[in-house]
Amino acid sequence: MKIAIVFGGSSYEHEISIVSAITMKKVLKNSELSFIFVDKNRDFYLIDSDNMKSSLFSSGKYKKSKNITLKSGGFFVDTMFGSKAIEIKVALNLIHGRDGEDGKIASLMEFYKVPFISPRVEASALSYNKLYTKFLAESLGVKVVEYQHLCKNDERKLTLSYPVIIKPVRLGSSIGVSIIKEESQLEYALDVAFEFDSDVIIEPFIDGVREYNQAGTKSKEWELSIIEEPQKEEFLDFEKKYMDFSRDEQVSKASISTELSDKIQETFKKIYDPLFLGSIIRCDFFVVGGEVLLNEINPIPGSMANYLFEDFEAMIERVASNLPKEHTIVIDYQYIDSIQQAKGKA
Amino acid sequence: MKIAIVFGGSSYEHEISIVSAITMKKVLKNSELSFIFVDKNRDFYLIDSDNMKSSLFSSGKYKKSKNITLKSGGFFVDTMFGSKAIEIKVALNLIHGRDGEDGKIASLMEFYKVPFISPRVEASALSYNKLYTKFLAESLGVKVVEYQHLCKNDERKLTLSYPVIIKPVRLGSSIGVSIIKEESQLEYALDVAFEFDSDVIIEPFIDGVREYNQAGTKSKEWELSIIEEPQKEEFLDFEKKYMDFSRDEQVSKASISTELSDKIQETFKKIYDPLFLGSIIRCDFFVVGGEVLLNEINPIPGSMANYLFEDFEAMIERVASNLPKEHTIVIDYQYIDSIQQAKGKA
């Protein structure tokens, strides 16, 4: 299958998106891949598969690649003799953070009628913002970790007891996140978080909480991954993060009861359907006192959480063949014709 | 000032967007306007100002106009000798309904760094969907009309008493909306609404409720319109709707107490700031028992609600000079460099 891997973007996670894309080259072995790089200026380049090494990007050499324009019907390579469409069955949105997860790339693809795997614009706007994720979960009857929302200009008064975790509402990959144990650390942690965002959420930091990750999608049927219990570290440093976005080997599933596993899967389905149709997402759950709480939705998980699925490549094909269709709107100018007729009669 | 008016779109409201755009030509008399038409296939055309008549579009003659491509830095006209940027200070998003109000046009503009007046992608996703508008209002402490949410596959059982109003969650301009007085009308009204959307909200229909419209924006300071008490009709037929989107004469303000007017303005500000910065919106409020309830947010109101402002054109200039800035993200490949160094050492 011909797949375009769209990666990079004007995002704090630009560099790990490159790592994710290189991982896709290893994982999607039987597919014909076109690598479409969005640079920090948001210019598009077609990267030769043989050149997919991180140094191509850090050195700026990618600029020698062919320019691409996105317009109605797809991606077009600019040539001396006009522009030529890149033939693909589907585009895989692999831009982490801004542009990729906030709905912008999804909007571009949908607007220009490029078939794509990614949350659509509405799903993106709700899952990119951790505060709106709470609203969404609550509206679906999914429990969440309790939280407090603070805007930049709000009084910095905590209603929760320490320790707490402070997160900018709109960023992923632990950027701007602090765990603080006492009030003396609060000012600095909030200053850091507000460097990145106008809004933060604060949650109790539950030491040793059981965490489980469930990835999945829906093609004709549900396609749920194994449930993983991720390794815990207070923080990810760059090597750890690199490991995370370059994972391509299947992991073993968490040893939990069928009852808990069913509960996690039911919760995943509630969140996913119908808002996330067309995407492969990973939900991170906490289990507290037997209850499943949504911690976060990863709308574009690192390396697409490929390592949680048995045959990721075959699944991509099934998803590509079952994408949600845009509602057809007939525009026939009946309304303008009626106005003109009415005016003619007057 | 040089302004691009972006209108049309793949939307049920494509035709009234044309009417809105023609109205802008009358209202923005001292500006240099470029009319950028998005046709039903989402191809862009530069329409000559002299040709801005509804028949140009209904006849298909617009296709003889110059093609435009949107890419990093702006709108470009395709010429025989390459492409040339259209010089503008700001673009005004005037696409009603899908594409314009759902965040897609906002995404395109922000992605390609075109300065624009319109709600940004997050504000669009929340205000385009009447259910999410309820979440938003509730999170801001703004009261709303009580409601029931139904998905396509839910049991069709009403928890509200008749009469009720049924609305598809994602459409504007009364499309798919029914007011029903008894249970016998329920099935048909829901069938109609679900023709247009997968989700509907149902609200009590409050006959004779006082309704007030407040439009506004924030440039350096708040710029709030007069408050209008709109004319009530059970439904808008096409001529009424045409009147609404072609309004260009100032209306007189509602005769209400200063206290109520203050309450409406405070509520507007709560909703607007900071989510809607960069846009001119109109909020429609109900007043029931002295309480101000948010009925709907119009993220791209008909003819930009110009008729509610004293000097709309001067305001557009002030808004254009005070648009929200995108957060700058520095991408310097430090992270990839560290990985490479670590690998080199290994």
Image (spheres, coloured by chain):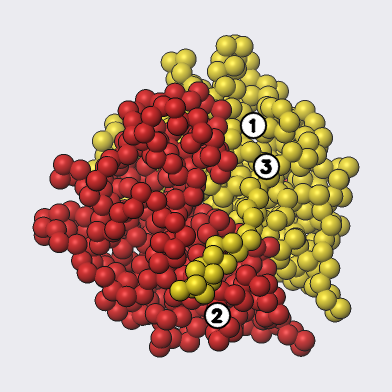
Chain colours: A red, B yellow
Q: Residues within 10 Å of mark 1 (few under 14, many from 20)?
A: many
Identify the residue under disc 3: B324
Q: Nearer the viewer, residue A55 or B2?
A: A55
Give the quadrant of the N terminus of chain B.
top right
Q: Which residue is mark 1?
A: B215
Q: Amino acid at mark 3?
A: Pro
Check the image and name the residue furthest to the front: B345
Q: Can you tell which mark lies on residue A52?
A: 2
Secondary structure at badge 1 equals strand
* Viewer-proximal residue among A62 and A291: A62
For marks 2 and 1, give the one nearer the viewer. 2
Subunit that carries the residue with mark 2: A
Distance, label 3 to label 2, CA atoms, is 36 Å
Q: In the picture, residue A282 is in which quadrant?
A: bottom left
- How many labels were placed on the picture? 3
Residue found 60% across the figure and 47% down from its top: B120
Describe residue B17's horizontal placement relative to residue A29 as left or right. right
Q: At numbered mark 3, what does the secondary structure look like: helix, strand or loop?
A: loop
Tell me: residue A19, above or below residue B207.
Answer: below
Q: Is residue A88 above or below residue B223?
A: below
Q: Which residue corresponds to the image point at 24% horizontal and 59% vertical from the top-left?
A: A229
Pointer 3 chain = B
Q: CA distance from mark 2 to mark 1?
A: 51 Å
Residue B5 location (% of width, % of height): 75, 52
The answer to which of marks 1 and 3 sits earlier in the sequence is 1
- Determine whether A276 is above or below B129 in the image: below
